[in-house]
């Protein structure tokens, strides 16, 4: 193994995190390489110095502050949870849905309206025409006889008298 | 975390209890300010709480946790880089938090081991200073590797790099520390020999 390759393994070797095969390779190299041997000793010294830094404890109020932050978080609710807490809205929505379904069903039961199709509408109108033009019915209609004569007819009779 | 996802508040409490000290220490060593480190650690826990419903166990929980913490720390370090230049000369001189709460520097009382105490203080200060001088990513790699004892694959995921890039980062970091701490390293090697 070369000194360059040692660079990727030396920290792992110092901290004992190499695989067995890698460790044996490193040790084989170290036997024949004094500079790398010195570097390993120095890295081991660095690792030992890093161990000297003491551990600090979080302040006593740390947990309380985390709890306060968590408690201040808005409660996240799902759509169904929203439905649960609002039964009126749920009732209104279901009623609306039922009404829509019923209307749809009711309209399907009704006969089609004539004005839907222009040709059908025309035929219907032609069938109704005889009723409208039945003059016998209109001339023999009793209530019409009780009506006062038209104004134009009165004026004509006055003019004839003057003449 | 899956219990927290299921709404178990006691499990969140367990996570808080288990990870608060490692997180605060990691963040303190990253940002060098205890108050800021605690604020960031609280932010990490809050983000964990917020993300509980969407949590998918695709990686180890510690990897996910320290990834959040590392990102927050790196952002904070970058934001603070310029603020440090604006520190008032009237600001009180403080001791480091590793010796207790930050407090104004006072003259130590007469003590039989005072000299030894001062030597130890100077030594720790030198080590902290050497870590501080590392580039942020190298610092994060060393702290995660040395103090959190995470394996290479986890640290590589946290730092979003390959394992070989991580090994290179660690080598360069240890090289810088070796040079920066040369007097202490030499002393240590002599003691080992």
Image: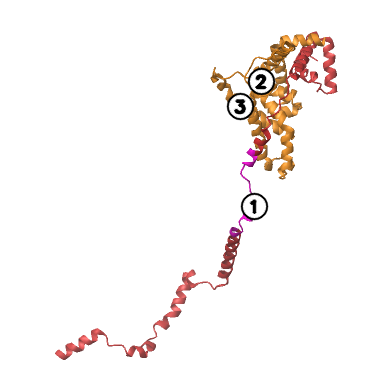
Chain colours: A red, B orange
Q: Which residue is mark 1?
A: A81
Q: Which residue is mark 2?
A: B96
Q: Residues within 10 Å of mark 3 (few under 14, many from 20)?
A: some
Q: Residue under mark 3: which chain is it in?
A: B
Does the magenta run of residues contain A82?
yes
Marks 1 and 3: same chain?
A: no
Q: Is residue A83 left or right of residue B167?
A: left
Q: Quadrant of residue A32?
A: top right
Task: Report the quarter where the N terminus of chain B lies.
Answer: top right
The residue positioned 63% from the left and 27% from the top of the image is B35
Instruction: Find residue B30 and report its horizontal and vertical position in percent.
Output: 66, 24
B53 or A115, nearer to the observer: B53
Q: Quadrant of residue B97?
A: top right
Q: Which residue is mark 3?
A: B76
Question: Label 2 to label 1, Cα distance in Å?
Answer: 50 Å
Q: Are marks 2 and 1 in contact (CB under 8 Å)?
A: no
Q: Residue under mark 2: which chain is it in?
A: B
Does the magenta run of residues contain B93?
no
Question: Label 1 to label 3, Cα distance in Å?
Answer: 38 Å
Secondary-structure class at tag 1: helix
Residue depth check, mark 2 versus mark 1: number of the one nearer the observer: 2
Give the dominant element type of the magenta stretch: helix, strand or loop: helix
Secondary-structure class at tag 3: helix
Q: Residues within 10 Å of mark 2 (few under 14, many from 20)?
A: some
Instruction: Find residue B130 and report its horizontal and vertical position in percent.
Output: 68, 16
- Would you place residue A86 above or below residue B170 in this image? below
Marks 2 and 1: same chain?
A: no
Task: Give the magenta range.
Answer: A68-89
Q: Residues within 10 Å of mark 1 (few under 14, many from 20)?
A: few
């Amino acid at each position: 193994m070369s000194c360059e390759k040692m660079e990727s393994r030396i920290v792992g070797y110092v901290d004992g995190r190499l695989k067995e095969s890698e460790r044996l390779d490193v040790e084989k190299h170290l036997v024949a390489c004094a500079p790398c041997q010195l570097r390993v000793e120095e890295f081991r010294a660095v690792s030992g110095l890093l161990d000297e830094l003491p551990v600090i404890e979080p302040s006593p109020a740390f947990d309380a502050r985390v709890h306060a932050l968590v408690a201040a978080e808005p409660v996240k609710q799902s759509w169904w949870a929203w439905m649960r807490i609002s039964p009126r809205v749920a009732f209104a929505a279901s009623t609306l849905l039922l009404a829509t379904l019923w209307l749809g069903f009711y309209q399907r039961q009704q006969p089609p309206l004539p004005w839907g199709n222009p040709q059908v509408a025309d035929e219907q109108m032609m069938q109704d025409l005889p009723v409208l033009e039945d003059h016998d019915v209109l001339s023999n209609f009793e209530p019409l006889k009780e009506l006062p004569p038209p104004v134009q007819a009165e004026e004509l009779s006055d003019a004839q008298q003057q003449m | 975390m899956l219990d927290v996802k299921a709404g178990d508040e006691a499990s969140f409490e367990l996570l808080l209890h288990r990870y608060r000290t490692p997180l605060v220490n990691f963040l303190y060593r990253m940002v060098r300010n205890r108050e800021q480190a605690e604020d960031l650690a609280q932010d990490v826990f809050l983000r964990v709480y917020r993300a509980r419903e969407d949590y998918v166990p695709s990686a180890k929980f510690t990897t996910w946790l320290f990834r959040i913490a590392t990102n927050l720390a790196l952002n904070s370090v970058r934001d603070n880089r310029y603020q440090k230049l604006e520190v008032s000369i009237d600001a009180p001189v403080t001791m480091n938090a590793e010796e207790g709460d930050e407090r104004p520097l006072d003259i130590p009382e007469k003590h039989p081991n005072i000299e030894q105490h001062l030597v130890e203080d100077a030594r720790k200060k030198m080590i902290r200073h050497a870590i501080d001088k590392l580039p942020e990513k190298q610092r994060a790699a060393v702290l995660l590797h040395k103090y959190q004892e995470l394996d290479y694959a986890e640290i590589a995921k946290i730092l979003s790099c390959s394992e070989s890039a991580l090994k290179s980062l660690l080598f360069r970091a240890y090289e810088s520390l070796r040079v920066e701490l040369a007097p202490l390293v030499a002393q240590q090697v002599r003691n080992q020999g």
